[in-house]
Image (cartoon, helix red, strand yellow):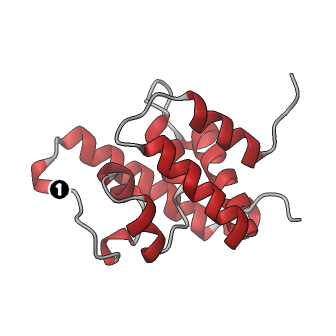
Amino acid sequence: MKHLGDIDWARKINERWIVGECLRKDTAAYLDFLGLADPHRLRTSCHRARFLLNHRRPSGEDPKPWFYSGVFSLVQAEEAKLYLRGHDFTLACIPGSDAFGLDMLNAAEIHSDTAAKIHRIRAALTELSELADDLSGPRA
């Protein structure tokens, strides 16, 4: 089997997984947008998604939150309003997303296991941001 680059891999994963609330469509549109607007951020986001899935996700845990949080990890506020509206869990996993002006999950209203998962994903994304020079993926 041919090894897929991070972008092709992310697109293939997004196409194959069963997800709700139009997440597949919004993710595909976001990837297309980044491909035109900011190819470097597209490569980095897809690399982060793959890295989180393969190296930070606890064994046996659902991979989808890790993948989608990685894909959207570098989303900007205006982009979040277009591509993450209605995807509250993914939005909650993005460090700094509380400043985007969108409705957020209320920690007091979610199960402690869900809150813990959000915390784990946020911590992993924060770590990636701190190591960005080492983990930004291949350069064009």
Q: Eyeballing the image, is 29 above or below 61?
A: below
| Residue in the image at 44% along x and 42% along y | 65
Quadrant in the picture for the C terminus: bottom right
Whole-percent x and y of residue 85?
34, 59
The image quadrant of residue 127 is bottom right
Amino acid of disc 1: Ala
User: Which residue is tagged 1?
Assistant: 107
Whole-percent x and y of residue 39?
75, 66
Whole-percent x and y of residue 45?
63, 58
Q: Nearer the viewer, residue 4 or 134?
A: 4
Q: How packed is label 1: few (under 14 Cα within 10 Å), some, or many (20 or more)?
A: few
Direction from residue 30 to residue 91 in the image, left or right? left
| Residue in the image at 54% along x and 43% along y | 67
Quadrant in the picture for the N terminus: top right
Direction from residue 70 to residue 102 in the image, left or right? left
Q: Eyeballing the image, is 101 above or below 52?
A: below
Q: Nearer the viewer, residue 8 or 3?
A: 8
| Residue in the image at 48% along x and 51% along y | 26
Whole-percent x and y of residue 133?
74, 70
Q: Nearer the viewer, residue 18 or 25?
A: 25
Count every numbered label the image shows and give the total.
1
The image quadrant of residue 106 is bottom left
